[in-house]
Image (spheres, rainbow, N blue to C red):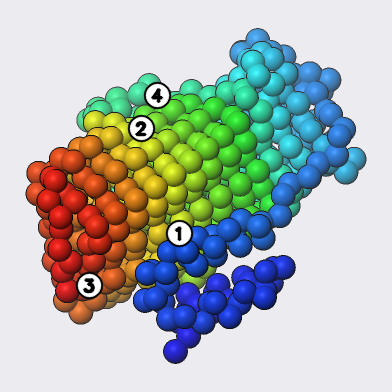
């Protein structure tokens, strides 16, 4: 039998110059998780198939379009003029020179590279009116809402690069208050996203099939904007920039294919400040990045509940290499907005270490989300300290009240290899599945956990293998 995994990989190989190797993809999925060499060869094939961005040598300095680097003058129009001129002339680089530039939303065009000089800093306005209503997404549900701070929709060959700073200026006196948490400045009587007419109304609209064009939020609804969002784009690069103080999710490729996120530093500790959230996206590379966040460092998504099933685009071929994870709810996380499914995730050569990092690898879903999560491969991980556990696989994730439904999820084929952990927190592995849908085919090979409170917490788990794995200096036996 040829599984969906096998078929997807076979298509990739046939569509690239590496089609001669397609025969290797006819193996059953259970053998994929045990065949380490071929697994990582497939990752290399995906890497080689991803097109690179290329831009004209023409440079369009925003100062030539009226920008003022005083940190006070609103430069939205100057950015817009420079980007449109660049695009109209065939593309090139829109240069943000040294200095501080205040602006509202920046909307990118095809063939444009927004490039920040080393000492450039873009300060984003704190006035919601400077972010027009656009087609975007909020926690896995599509919506007409405030524009992301940097936004591109239906664009090809587009980039944000340079060693400057992107500063959302969010803190507990502005955007973060909307989260409705006392930890971020909210007080009783303040409006927030949690009010009855806000977040849950959006989710209800999606469940009832209300068209996205009619899900109009924005003013008075308190759903914070994403920072950088590429919506239905292709061939994208984000490189070298430092991103700080985000209102909400930080790097959000949605329905976007062939994106490279390289040498980016994220330092933002606000509510829902995920570092990078690929959603409904394919062929995504996140490499040489540093994440220090208030939520998940990397969270791979695929839509929430009915909206995710409506879109039905799985996230796949997600590659994470040579990254550093500091604070966060998880290092590399899959979910919880995951209804369309996730497969073919490769994580290698990463460092995760902080007393404020809850887990290293985490999968979270529930029976409202559903989704098939399979073929998750991790190797060469150095973990210093995590609070809760090294690997957590949870089919009963519940954070916003009742999260149960009729869509029982699937989690299978997860492999950790060559992982060294100093302090694993409470458990080495925490896996919680359904009797009718157990967490299945989990492999830990050459994993060394020096210190952890308990070996594992397992419920409805089928076929978990410990190969040359030692926890608290004792070799661990497999569990059928």
Residue 388: in sight, yes or no?
A: yes
Mark nearer the N terminus (2 vs 3): 2
- For mark 1, what is the residue? 345
Tell me where residue 463 appears, x and y as whole percent: 22, 72
Q: Nearer the viewer, mark 4 or mark 2?
A: 2
- The dot on residue 7 is none
Choose top left, top right, bottom left or bottom right for residue 460. Answer: bottom left
Does residue 223 appear left or right of residue 395 in this picture?
right
Q: Nearer the viewer, mark 1 or mark 3?
A: 3
Q: Is residue 246 above or below residue 117?
A: below
Q: Residue furthest right?
A: 89
Element assignment for label 2: loop
Does residue 72 appear left or right of residue 392 in this picture?
right
- For mark 3, what is the residue? 463
Mark nearer the N terminus (2 vs 1): 2
Mark nearer the N terminus (1 vs 3): 1
- Foreground pick, 413 / 397: 413
- For mark 4, what is the residue? 171
- Foreground pick, 344 / 229: 344
* Quadrant (top left/top right/bottom left/bottom right) for the C terminus: bottom left
Q: Is residue 131 above or below residue 38?
A: above
Q: Residue furthest bottom?
A: 1
- For mark 2, what is the residue? 326
* Quadrant (top left/top right/bottom left/bottom right) for the N terminus: bottom left
Q: Does the CB distance between marks 4 and 2 fall below 8 Å?
A: no
Q: Nearer the viewer, mark 1 or mark 4?
A: 1
Q: Is residue 28 above or below residue 75?
A: below
Which residue: 42% across, 69% down?
35
Mark nearer the N terminus (4 vs 2): 4
Q: Residue furthest top?
A: 70
Element assignment for label 1: strand
Does residue 68 appear left or right of residue 443 in this picture?
right
């Amino acid at each position: 039998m040829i599984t969906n995994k096998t078929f997807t990989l076979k298509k990739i190989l046939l569509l690239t110059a590496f089609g001669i190797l397609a025969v290797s993809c006819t193996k059953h999925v259970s053998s994929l998780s045990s065949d380490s060499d071929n697994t990582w060869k497939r990752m290399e094939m995906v890497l080689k198939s991803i097109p690179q961005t290329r831009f004209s040598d023409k440079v369009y300095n925003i100062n030539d379009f009226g920008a003022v680097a005083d940190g006070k003058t609103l430069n939205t129009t100057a950015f817009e003029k420079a980007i449109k001129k660049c695009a109209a002339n065939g593309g090139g680089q829109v240069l943000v020179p040294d200095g501080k530039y205040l602006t509202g939303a920046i909307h990118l065009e095809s063939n444009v590279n927004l490039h920040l000089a080393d000492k450039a800093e873009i300060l984003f306005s704190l006035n919601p009116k400077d972010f027009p209503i656009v087609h975007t997404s909020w926690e896995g549900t599509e919506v007409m809402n405030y524009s992301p701070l940097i936004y591109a929709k239906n664009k090809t060959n587009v980039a944000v690069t340079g060693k400057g700073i992107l500063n959302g200026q969010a803190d507990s006196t502005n955007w973060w208050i909307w989260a409705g948490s006392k930890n971020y400045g909210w007080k009783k009587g303040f409006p927030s996203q949690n009010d009855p007419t806000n977040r849950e109304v959006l989710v209800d609209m999606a469940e009832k099939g209300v068209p996205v064009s009619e899900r109009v939020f924005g003013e008075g609804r308190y759903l914070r904007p994403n920072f950088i969002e590429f919506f239905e784009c292709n061939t994208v690069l984000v490189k070298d920039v430092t991103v700080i103080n985000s209102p909400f999710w930080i790097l959000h490729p949605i329905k976007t294919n062939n994106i490279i996120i390289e040498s980016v530093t994220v330092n933002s500790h606000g509510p829902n400040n995920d570092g990078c959230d690929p959603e409904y996206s394919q062929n995504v590379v996140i490499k040489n990045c540093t994440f220090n966040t208030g939520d998940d460092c990397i969270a791979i998504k695929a839509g929430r509940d009915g909206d995710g099933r409506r879109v039905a685009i799985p996230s796949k071929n997600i590659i994470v290499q040579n990254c550093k994870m500091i604070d966060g709810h998880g290092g590399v996380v899959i979910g919880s907005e995951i209804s369309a499914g996730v497969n073919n995730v490769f994580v290698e050569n990463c460092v995760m270490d902080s007393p404020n990092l809850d887990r290293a690898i985490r999968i979270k879903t529930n029976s409202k989300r559903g989704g098939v999560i399979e073929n998750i491969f991790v190797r060469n991980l150095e973990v210093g300290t995590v609070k809760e556990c090294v690997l957590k696989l949870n089919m009963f994730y519940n954070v916003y009240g009742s999260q149960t439904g009729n869509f029982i999820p699937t989690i299978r084929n997860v492999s950790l290899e060559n992982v060294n952990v100093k302090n694993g927190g409470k458990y080495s592995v925490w896996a919680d599945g359904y009797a009718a849908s157990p967490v299945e085919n989990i492999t830990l090979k050459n994993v060394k956990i020096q210190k952890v409170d308990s070996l594992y917490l397992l419920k409805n788990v089928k076929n978990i293998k410990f190969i040359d794995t030692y926890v608290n200096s004792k070799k661990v036996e497999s569990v059928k």
